Image (tube, rainbow, N blue to C red):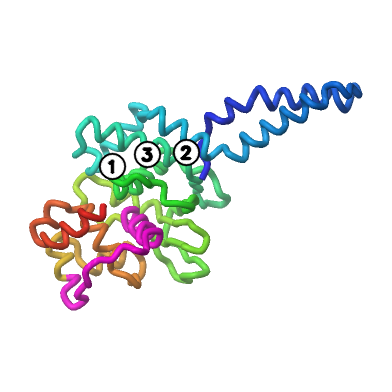
Amino acid sequence: MKIHSITSLFSSPFVIAVFYYGYKTFVLDDPNTFVYFFVAILIAVSLHVFQPQIDYYWYSKHPQRLHKKEQEILSLTSSFYNTLDEEEKMRFEHRVYIFIRAKDFKWVREEQKELPLDMKLMIAANAVQLTLHKEEFLYGEYDNYFAYNHPFPTPEKQFLHSVEVNHEDRMAIFNIENLMQAQNVNNKIFNIGLYAFAEIYLKINNGITFSTIDKNIFWEEIEEISRIKKESIINHIGYKPESLYPILITIFFMYPKHFEKYQPKRYKELSNVF
């Protein structure tokens, strides 16, 4: 995890001091300045090593809101964000602010490039939505997020699909076009962003237990709540998932009112978790 970076500002004087005293010590051969060189380089290296912790602590103590343009993007792409009151929006924005600075986002094209800000915001908003009411919201060491413009194969899944979480490498991959289609205020398309972070959350919190899913009626219940067909959900993911719980959690977050209406017991269970 790395956040860009209040620590860089703190470390700048010490980096300058390293060069200054290094020059005097090793070029001008002044032995009296070696201790200053040593202290400066020790502090600079320490700040670099502990940069994630320092930055996280700083931003946690000094909440940041998003710029107006970024708020507008969230308003257009996150129905959840639009339901929040002003205090909750501030909390949501602050966590999105930290998330997009704590993680690496790459756009896989002819060569890997930094993902545009609006796409980072979409990924981060889905991550934060699941954990808005939890103390830990950065998903541990899952630090790398990759985006394609199209369905993609991987060594683990050698066929075209639109979302994948690699737990060994602590990363997630998205077909960004598919994710963007799901980011509409009407929630008419299965959200692969929520799906991926639900899978990550369950992996990190593997001690959580849910009541058993009845596979015979699962898809019938999901379609009743969401009005999205099983075939559409599978198509948007790109494969039949091994576990149905990430799908269940995704639908819970996409359609909370319908979920509570049709599955009140399951709704209470998931509400207690999230």
Query: Seen in the image, is 96 located left or right of residue 269?
Result: right
- Circle 1 sits on which residue? 77
Residue 228, visible in the rendered structure? yes
Secondary structure found at label 2? helix
Question: Which residue lies at the image location 16% right of the left edge and 57% below the top edge?
Answer: 268
Q: Is residue 44 above or below residue 137?
A: above
- Between marks 2 and 1 in the image, the one whose residue lies nearer the viewer: 2
Asked if residue 188 shows in the view, the reply is: no
Q: Secondary structure at mark 3?
A: helix
Q: Give residue 142's position: percent from left, percent from top.
A: 47, 53
Residue pictured at 22% horizontal, 43% vertical? 79
Q: CA distance from mark 2 to mark 1?
A: 20 Å
**Looking at this rendering, what residue extends furthest in the bottom direction?**
216
Q: Which quadrant of the view contains residue 68? A: top left
Q: Image point 62% across, 37% down: which residue?
A: 48
Task: Find disc 2 in the rendering and name its residue.
Answer: 101
The segment highlighted magenta reads 192-219
Tell me the element at label 1. helix
Name the residue beneath numbered marker 3.
96
53 inside magenta stretch? no
How far apart, in angstroms, are the residues tagged by discs 2 and 3? 9 Å
Label 2: few (<14), some or many (≥20) within 10 Å?
A: some
Q: CA distance from mark 1 to mark 3?
A: 14 Å
From the viewer's perspective, is 253 left or right of 39? left
Residue nearest the viewer, comparing 135 with 189: 135
